Image (cartoon, rainbow, N blue to C red):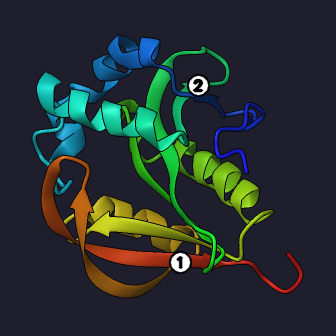
Amino acid sequence: MNWQPTDLKNEIVCLVPLKETDFEELYAVASDPLIWEQHPNKNRYQRTVFLNFFKGAIESKGAFIIRDTKTKEAIGSSRFCNYKELANQIEIGYTFFARKCWGKLYNKAVKELMINYALRFTNSVHFFVGAENYRSQKAMEKLGALKIKEVIIPYYGEPDRLNFEYEIKKTSTG
């Protein structure tokens, strides 16, 4: 299964498999402290903390740099991770966007591309959102995801944090 396809794009965003050479460009987006203010790791805007995040993204073999389709500018990142073959499910997470993209169609465009791709191969897609990340919780609800439980999640090289788990299941017609 290829969790880094090269054809995930629409008129708003293009998801490009993340490469090590993307670090500086992506860090330029991520270095805004306000992006992380509701996130469980509020220090991810710091270079050394983001470097750890980026290393985890590369090792996941499912991460993308998100580009604006029209300008080709880097505007964020997301990834497929934690594929569970026996449960036939995948997680979409670690998503962030430049603030100028907030409240617009970018998150919905990215998540729809990723969800539609994932549900071709799995029965469900899961998301983990920090308990204090109200923006992302609202975004999950707008996508039709259901909150199914609260869990403590280990972050790659970071302290464990309380998260809400959301799920979108494949429909019988989908």
Instruction: Please give the name of the residue rendered at 17% of the width and 57% of the height, measured from the top-left corner.
Output: 40
Callout 1, which amino acid? Glu
Residue at image mark 2:
68
* 110 horizontally vs 99: left or right: right
Q: Find residue 4 and name its label.
A: none
Q: Is residue 90 above or below residue 9?
A: below
Q: Position of residue 63 (x, y in %)?
A: 51, 38
The answer to whether residue 46 of the structure is visible from this angle is no
Counting the numbered discs, the total is 2
The part of the image, by quadrant, that contains residue 29 is: top left
Residue at image mark 1:
167
Q: Position of residue 1 (x, y in %)?
A: 73, 51
* 62 horizontally vs 6: left or right: left
Secondary element under disc 2, as helix, strand or loop, is strand
Secondary element under disc 1, as helix, strand or loop, is strand
The answer to whether residue 15 of the structure is visible from this angle is yes
Q: Is residue 12 above or below residue 71?
A: below
Instruction: Please give the name of the residue rendered at 48% of the width and 74% of the height, measured from the top-left corner.
Output: 141
Marks 2 and 1 sit apart, C-alpha to C-alpha, by 27 Å
Tag 2: Cα neighbours inside 10 Å, few (<14), some, or many (≥20)? Answer: some
Which of discs 2 and 1 lies nearer the camera? The answer is 1
Which is more toward the observer, 142 or 1?
A: 1
Callout 2, which amino acid? Asp
Q: Is residue 30 above or below residue 28?
A: below
Instruction: Please give the name of the residue rendered at 15% of the width and 50% of the height, measured from the top-left corner.
Output: 158
Which is more toward the observer, 12 or 116?
A: 116
